[in-house]
Every structure is written in C-alpha cells, then in structure tokens.
Image: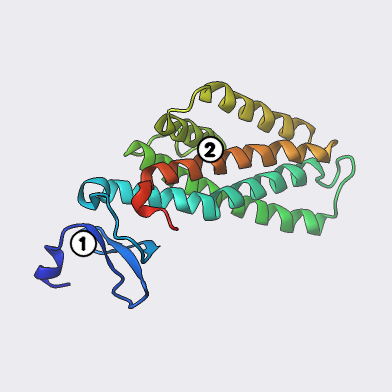
C-alpha cells in the first residue's frame, strides 16, 4: 500500500472491487462493512468508525453469523450425549456417542472462542471470565445489555442462566427443555442485532 493511500482518512468510499456499493476504509485497509449505493452516508465516519468500533461490529457480526449457532448447537449436543452415554438410562451406541461427543466439543469450543472475542471487543481488553466456556456467554450478554442501556437487563440475564441450568438438569429425561436453551440463544441474537443496529447508525443501515 502506498504512503498516499495510508493518508486517506477513514470513511465510506466507492468499493474498489467495482461493486455498486460503499465500503468502509478504516485508515489502513478496507473493511468488510458495505452498504448499497443510494444517498451518501450523512454521518462522520472518521469519528464514529475508528478501529475499535469496527472491531466491535465485526465481532458482533461473527456472533450472529457463527458464534451463537455453533455454541448453542454444540452445548445442547454435548449435554444430550453425556445424558445418554452408554451405561446410563436410554443410552446411545458407543460409536455414535464418541462421534457426537467430538462434534459437540468442537462446536462448543468454536462458539466459546467467538464469545471470548466478543467480550474482548466489548470491554477493550481480555479478561478471565471472558475466556471461561458457558460463563463468557453471560458476560457477553451483560456487556451487550450495558451498551444498549437495557432496562431490566439483570433479571433477564438471571432468567437465561436459570433456563440454561434447567436444560442441563432436565435434558436427559425431558428433551422438550431444549426449547429453554433455544430461547436463551434467541435472546443472545436479539441483543447482538440490537447493538449492531445501534453502533451502525443510519449511515450503515441498508435500505
């Protein structure tokens, strides 16, 4: 990249790929954030979209696209496999249990990494609780709720914790409690999408 290019201020510019859309230049490289052509963005991108804001948006988008699905699918599968492990009541075959356990651990780990990165982006630093599986999902929920200034966010997160514990306790005998975990995942997605909308502002919302 030339010295001239690196001196271009961060902001919205026509996509250099030739696509009919705007793309964010963060001051050193092109971001993945785009919006269709229309009225030029009215916001002041240099002030609103520094590297920190772009990193937070990128992390939140990864949570909505991959993190929530990977984590909650893996976690639900993990608890289910452990509850029906060979030797327990209503066991599955040993071969299926081993394969499912590997997939469950992999998905849960991937989701945990995305949530850890999300907590890091929201706080601006790494923290121990942000790295602990299961715990970091609720830490991310708390940080997103704080950014959104959500009323009654504390009780809502406590409810999510209770629903998760209920799923862990009842899943082996009551498969229908998977609905409870699905509602927790839905709440996570709702928070993430709301925060993306808030941080993006009118200039980033597509028509």
Residue 170 image point, x, y percent: 79, 32
Q: Residue furthest bottom?
A: 18
Give how far across and how far down residue 57 sits, in percent: 39, 49
Residue closest to the far front: 39
Cβ atoms under marks 2 and 1 closer than 8 Å = no
Q: Which of marks 2 and 1 is nearer the N terminus?
A: 1
Residue 94 x/y as whole percent: 82, 55
Residue annotated with mark 1 = 28
Decide: few, some or many residues near mark 1? Use Cα within 10 Å; few <14, some 14-19, many ≥20: some
Pick whichever, 90 or 36, lies toward us.
36
Which residue extends farthest right? 90
The quadrant of the rendering that contains the N terminus is bottom left
How many numbered marks appear? Answer: 2
Image-based side of 192 in relation to 98, left or right: left
Q: Residue at x 15, y 63 (%)?
A: 8
Residue wearing tag 2: 137
Quarter containing the C terminus: bottom left
Q: How is the image coloured?
A: rainbow
Indicate the quadrant where residue 28 lies: bottom left
Closer to the camera, 184 or 102?
Answer: 184
Q: In this view, does 108 lie to the left or right of 92?
A: left
Query: Closer to the observer: label 2 or label 1?
Result: 1
Query: Looking at the image, which residue is at 75% across and 40% down?
Result: 178
* Occupied quadrant, residue 26: bottom left
Q: How far apart are marks 2 and 1 (CA)?
A: 32 Å
Give the secondary structure at mark 2. Answer: helix
Tell me residue 125's x, y (percent).
Answer: 32, 38
Q: Where 92 falls versus 31 (above or below)? A: above
Element on which disc 1 rests: loop
């Amino acid at each position: 990249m030339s010295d001239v290019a690196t001196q271009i201020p961060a902001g919205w510019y026509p996509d250099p790929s030739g696509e009919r859309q705007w793309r964010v230049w963060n001051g050193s490289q092109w971001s993945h954030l785009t919006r269709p052509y229309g009225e030029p963005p009215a916001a002041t991108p240099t002030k609103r979209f520094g590297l920190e804001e772009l990193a937070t948006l990128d992390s939140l988008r990864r949570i909505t696209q991959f993190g929530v699905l990977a984590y909650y699918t893996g976690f639900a599968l993990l608890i289910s496999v452990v509850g029906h492990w060979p030797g327990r009541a209503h066991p599955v075959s040993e071969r299926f249990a081993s394969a499912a356990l590997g997939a469950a651990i992999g998905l849960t780990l991937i989701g945990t990494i995305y949530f850890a990165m999300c907590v890091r982006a929201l706080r601006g630093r790494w923290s121990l609780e942000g790295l602990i599986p299961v715990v970091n999902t609720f830490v991310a929920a708390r940080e997103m709720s704080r950014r959104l200034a959500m009323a009654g966010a504390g009780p809502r997160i406590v409810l999510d914790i209770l629903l998760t514990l209920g799923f862990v306790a009842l899943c082996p005998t009551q498969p229908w409690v998977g609905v409870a975990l699905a509602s927790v995942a839905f709440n996570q997605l709702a928070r993430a999408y709301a925060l993306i909308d808030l941080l993006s502002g009118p200039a980033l919302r597509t028509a």
